[in-house]
Image (cartoon, rainbow, N blue to C red):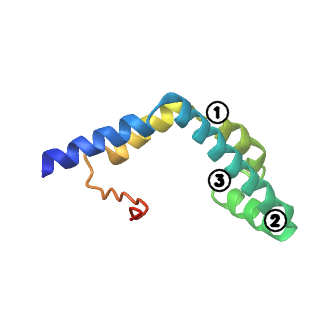
Amino acid sequence: MIGESDSLRRQFINIWGTKFLLSVTTQIAVAKIVGQKKISRADLGNLASTSALDELYGIGFDDYKRLRAQIEAVTLDEVRAVARRTFDGAPFVLAVVRPEPQG
């Protein structure tokens, strides 16, 4: 049973771990994060609060100006490395959902 689970995990990683899919997913994730940050800065109260906390923590009040470039600089290899460190060998649950057979 454990070997079967390990085999399924490897198949899952191979199927979803293709460079194209991860590349597109990474681009979507970056766009989503950048968009969310942009929306949160539209509220001046939120921008003031965030800037004040960033200054308090020593990051700098204008960190939001550098953040976009830092987020966009994340590479696919960096994402893969973090995913491997986080998920490789970790127990997981794989749920397969299929429609009921007609009949």
Q: How many marks?
A: 3
> Which quarter of the picture shows residue 95?
bottom left
Q: Nearer the viewer, mark 1 or mark 2?
A: 1
Mark 1 and mark 2: Cα distance apart in space: 26 Å
Q: Is residue 26 left or right of residue 18?
A: right
Task: Indicate whether 46 appears above or below 93.
Answer: below
Between 44 and 24, which is closer to the camera in this rendering? 24
Residue kind at label 2, given as amino acid type = Ala
- Circle 3 residue: 58
56 or 30: nearer the viewer:
30
List the residue tagged with mark 2. Answer: 48
Which of the two labelled residues, at mark 1 and mark 3, occupies the earlier sequence position?
Answer: 3
Amino acid type shown at disc 1: Ala
| Residue under the point 41% across and 37% down | 15
Badge number at residue 73: 1
Position of 26 with respect to 46 (left or right) is left
Circle 3 SS class: loop
Are there few (<14), some (14-19), or many (20+) residues within 10 Å of tag 2? few
Q: Position of residue 100 (x, y in %)?
A: 40, 65
State the residue at coordinates (49%, 38%).
Answer: 79
Q: Amino acid at mark 3?
A: Gly
Q: Nearer the viewer, mark 1 or mark 3?
A: 1
Q: Residue at x 53, y 32 (%)?
A: 76
Question: Are the residues at dot 1 and dot 2 in contact (C-beta closer than 8 Å)?
Answer: no
Q: Position of residue 82 (x, y in %)?
A: 43, 41
